[in-house]
Amino acid sequence: MSTNGFNQQIADAFTEKMVDVLNYGSLALMTSIGHRTGLFDTMATLPPATIEQIAASADLHERYVREWLGAMVVGRIIEHDPETNTYRLPAEHAAALTRAAAPNNIAAFTQYIGLLGSVEDGIVDSFRNGGGVPYAAFPRFQEVMAEDSGQSVLPALLDHILPLVPGLIEKLEQGIEVLDVGCGRGLALLLMAQTFPKSRFTGYDFSENGIAAARAEARQKGLTNLRFAVQDAATLAETERYDLITTFDAIHDQAKPAAVLRNIHRALKTDGIYLMQDIAGSSHVHNNLDHPMGPFLYTVSTMHCMTVSLAYNGEGLGAMWGREKALEMLTDAGFTQVEVKELAHDIQNHYYINRKG
């Protein structure tokens, strides 16, 4: 009913929605804990089990497991039989919650909620005073991003992403120079270096911790056809050196993305390819109303991508810079041929194949 323009039914429905938001936000945190503690992985291997059996199998304290199970049961994620006092993770739920289910493991992504929540005070301060929250305020970000990449980029890299460029696999097999900008812990390069021993690989990132982890992994694997270096992509000064340059969800995080794209253009050989993976979406918010991950991506943008850039007096491009802005910036950087491709299994990213001309 409407009184003086106020529709009570709409108000009631919206209140219910906000209660759902509160409950689902809470479940996201508890799901992250279930992932990090290995509880989902443990329960996926167990028959219906008691709290004590689950805690013992996961090597965790029973009291915490008990309360966590309470949230999982009322959240309809884990099933409970009160007659036998046992708990069960249905196989259909495990298919979206366990490490064995990668790349379909949604639980891994729920880690971002707690990670972003930890900097809420700094974000609120930035709303009021400007500036941003620096990268150092996110101590687990490299770890979470590496896991994200490990279950999203890596499984698709050889069979789906690289084949988007016709003939690229063959060139990598023959031997070319490859650069990954914003390589993080270097997971993509490590896989390519192992797979294509005749090619030579370089990884740049401004995170010393990320580069240290990448170097350690390369040494452990005995790989000699790749190198990693701490490098701010905005100051990259190489010229026509690489046959292939890649970035995986890296450009929108840069303090100076326009400069980075120009530097990539300059570092690419005349006949080279720049393969850019970045967030799928539009530069116009009304076009993102039906985006299946829209609220999540705008939140990640506000509380990490944009604010980190602004913390370094950057452009604050943000994760949802969108296809339109990306095409504009790639053209401004000097790329005269740009193709945008999508993968059927990947609702989160666009793949831009860029050539100098």
Image (cartoon, helix red, strand yellow):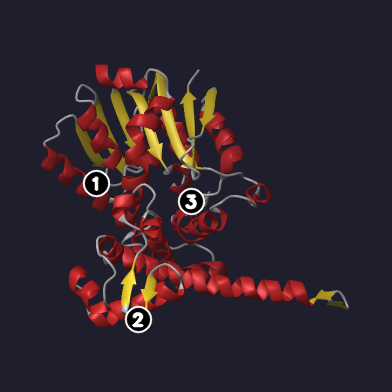
Which is in the foreground here, disc 3 or disc 1? 1
Q: Residues within 10 Å of mark 2 (few under 14, many from 20)?
A: few
Does the residue at mark 3 contact the one at mark 1 (Cβ under 8 Å)?
Answer: no
Circle 2: residue type: Glu
Specify the quadrant that holds the N terminus: bottom right
Q: Residue at x 42, y 67 (%)?
A: 77
Alpha carbon separation for disc pair 3 and 1:
22 Å
x, y percent for residue 296: 51, 58
Report the residue that reaches farthest toward the front. Answer: 83
- If you read the primary sequence from the N terminus, does the residue marked by circle 3 or circle 1 appear first? 1
- If you read the primary sequence from the N terminus, does the residue marked by circle 2 or circle 3 appear first? 2
Query: Which SS class for mark 3?
Result: loop
Q: Provide the residue designation for mark 2.
A: 83
Q: Residues within 10 Å of mark 3 (few under 14, many from 20)?
A: some
Q: Residues within 10 Å of mark 1 (few under 14, many from 20)?
A: many
Q: Nearer the viewer, residue 232 or 354?
A: 354
Q: Is residue 89 left or right of residue 54?
A: right
Query: Which SS class for mark 2?
Result: loop
Q: Residue at x 44, y 67 (%)?
A: 28
